[in-house]
Amino acid sequence: MKSSFTIVGLGELLWDIFPEGKQLGGAPANFAYMTALLGDRGIVASRVGQDRLGQEAFWTLKSSGLDTSEIQIDPAHDTGTVQVKVDSKGQPEYSINENVAWDHLAWTPEWEALAKSADAVCFGSLAQRSEASRATIRKFLQSVGTDVARIFDVNLRQSFFSAEILRIALLHANIVKVNHEELLRIIELFREKFSGERDAACWLAREFGVKLMCVTRGHQGSLLVCGEQIDEHAGFTVKVADTVGAGDAFTAALAHHWLRQTPLREINIAANRMGAWVASQEGAMPIGDESVLSEIR
């Protein structure tokens, strides 16, 4: 088995603008950063503007040890930004600017080569809000190898999704991660009814041929469904700084251990530990703490 895997975060790269300042983010970028902390080759496949924020994004990721060679430059659109407000419980509220660089992801020979070399790719629903990026993401997923982990990390933001976008994304995925509220929304969009979260998760996995279905529950842990196996974890108690990026960290640990064929229970423990650690830190890309990371790897 490989000691390190090529793991791609495909989609939005943006700046989260907080009242006290800005931090680089976007779920695919957060995810790729976390996989790199765990020892894999994390690659961000996104697009930024030919502007100061785009340059800052490059240098921020590069200085963090991430491969930035697959970030496209858009001469006509600005680098993405999001206005973020965090409530008293550490929960973020987002206002996402539209028609920015990552809404114009382009299918290129470089991205085709990246798709063919990837061991895993994580994508979401937000970057599929535009027709151009949606087509590119689908082309990327169609170009990866049959054994590649195709992780759909659902992120339902504002009105940037539809039942059809979600349905096609689920068909492309073999791993799905969704939080409890998003699961309920998806079931509602598909006009299904279930007695509980577990039944809904199992149905979604069966309906779309998903190998690993994950439902996160915030500080209350998570549910994993893999075939006939079901595992639940109650989560870890930490002092929350903010929860921005905690779900992406969870997904990164999940991908890291899935590729290494780690038993389901251990995947759940590692993913919850990773998510809890990030929730205890400021921002979505905290500096790695080797004492924590060594326990998660």
Image (cartoon, rainbow, N blue to C red):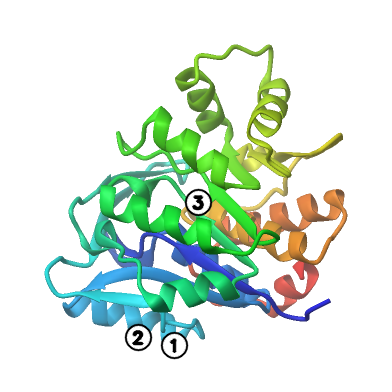
| The disc label shown at residue 78, or none | none
Q: Which residue is mark 2?
A: 59
Q: Residues within 10 Å of mark 1 (few under 14, many from 20)?
A: few
First-in-chain label (3 vs 2): 2
- The residue most toward the left is 76
Q: Nearer the viewer, mark 3 or mark 1?
A: 1
- Determine whether the residue tagged by mark 2 lies in a helix, strand or loop: helix
27 vs 207, nearest the viewer: 207
Q: Does the rendering let one see residue 284?
A: no
* Residue depicted at 49% across the width and 42% down the height: 169
Q: Which residue is mark 3?
A: 243
Separation of residues labelled 3 and 1 (CA atoms): 23 Å
Circle 1/circle 2 CB separation < 8 Å: yes
Q: Which residue is mark 1?
A: 63
Q: What is the three-letter code of the residue carrying label 2?
A: Trp
Residue 70 horizontal/vertical position (percent): 41, 78
